[in-house]
Amino acid sequence: MDLSGNSLLWKLLSVAVLVLAAALLLVFDPWDFGYPELWRKTGLAGAPARAAACLVAGVLLLAAGWLYRLFFAPLELLRSPEDVGYVAEDGRSRARAANEVRRRRKTGELPPVYPNGWYRVLDSHMLERGDVRSVTVLGEQVAVFRGQDGKAYVVDAYCPHLGANLAVGGRVVGSCIECPFHGWQFRGEDGKCVRIPYAEKVPEFAKVRCWPSCEVNGQVLVWFHCDGEQPGWRVPEQREISRGEWVYRGRTEHFINAHIEEIPENAADIAHLAHLHTPGIVSGVDLRYTNSKTWEFIRHDWKVEWNPEPEPNKHCSQMLVKHALTVFGRHWPLLDLSVVARQVGPGLVFLLFDHSFLGQGVIMHCVTPVEPLLQCVSHTIFYQSSIPPLVPKFILRAECIQFERDVMIWNNKKYISNPMLVKEDSAIQKHRRWFSQFYSENSPRLRYQHDTLDF
């Protein structure tokens, strides 16, 4: 769902209704409709007065729409790759600044770029029955579609016949996807071609690669393993979402110009919280100004502990976060918040909230590699249905501000394989050892920097 597109559509419809209503009232005399007394009593018998009434009605309509989006509609902040984390100077555009940083930055000695694990492709509500979506994931183009049976499938985007993109013009037929070029139909379950309109027989070898996938917690995910091994664990189901007790309240989306491991490593980098995330969220996301004395009256205090989980959940880890807020040096206990952030594999984190006043919910933090050094990071919030939507929307917005401070670091930093650490940084090395389990001998590596995507 595109927030900017919906906002523009709403504005255009509102303006159209306003103009139409004004035209009708200016062109037609109210006597024609049989209500002269009403217009006289309200003083709207003249055309100028009627035009003013239309303008007031239009303003009220726009205000009502704005209030509805504020209090009831999900919050959706979808950032473009160049929107966050770059400093545009000397009249340059942000896109130009982003591209220059990507080309000139030293990458360092990198780990493999695509760890083995589950990755989010898109949210379930973005894929209706019969829909086909084109998605770039792990350096590959895939076609994601929902069959008439209601199940989501993920297959390679390019038809093995002559290379047409199945997601561009392809259509869903039952539980198959039909190529827009010659009408070949591929079964979503296993990728096998089941129909060629002009051929007497379908060859046994005719098939498209089918990605192992699952749909859970309102998301469609795919499994990647460099050696083609089957999934080594299942994505845990958040039962409150399945039962409808927690409902969708919004999502944010960012693109990060960094290696995937840098992002979850923040959980073990306890020291950065006190420096980067202590200034209040009102000070914004630009790190040149977050420590301004104007906003130093509001501070966030953090206590964090990170540990890997033992067998049989060695692919999981937990970060325990305790947050406190001080305003003018006074502690506000009502806003104390404890969060359990459970990471499952390299690309999924469940941030669980449980507050006596603010209610319960979860933010699903998902990191999906688009290409070797470009990550799509989404935060999707599901929250207790009895809590007013404004509460989870505020939580998501606050989390977004803190996250965008990290983005400015990630987008401009170099990966250091052997960092200079002190004993207080021991959790960082511990995290790197834990994360290494998601790499195999054949995990793909970045041999050279090749810019394939300009912003």
Image (tube, rainbow, N blue to C red):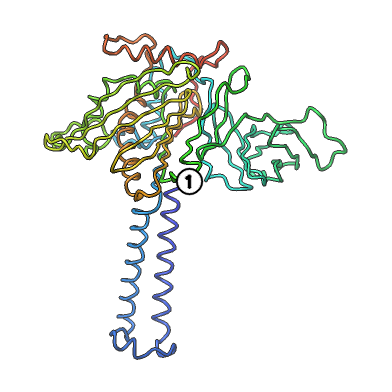
Q: Looking at the image, which residue is at 50% across and 34% down?
A: 237
Viewer-proximal residue among 178 and 297: 297
Name the element at disc 1: loop
Report the side of 335 relative to 174 (left or right).
left
Residue 289 appears in view:
no
Please indicate, yes or no, whether residue 65 appears anywhere in the rendered image.
yes
Query: What residue does disc 1 label?
Result: 244
For residue 317, above or below residue 127: above
Q: As displayed, is residue 138 above or below residue 201?
A: above
Along the line of sight, the residue nearer the viewer: 76 or 147:
147
- Three-letter amino acid code of the residue under disc 1: Gly
451 to the left or right of 49: right
Camera-side residue: 12 or 383? 383
The image quadrant of residue 104 is top left
How packed is label 1: few (under 14 Cα within 10 Å), some, or many (20 or more)? Answer: few
Q: Tell me residue 3's x, y (percent).
A: 42, 49
**Residue extending furthest right?**
200
Residue reaching furthest to the front: 356
Taking the spot 38% from the left edge, 47% from the top edge, the residue there is 75
Front-most of 380 and 407?
380
Name the residue rendered at 51%, 20% in the picture.
Answer: 115
Q: Position of residue 348 (x, y in %)?
A: 46, 28
How far from the left and from the top, in percent, is residue 35?
39, 88
**In which quadrant of the rendered image does the C terminus lie?**
top left
Quarter residue 150 falls in:
top right
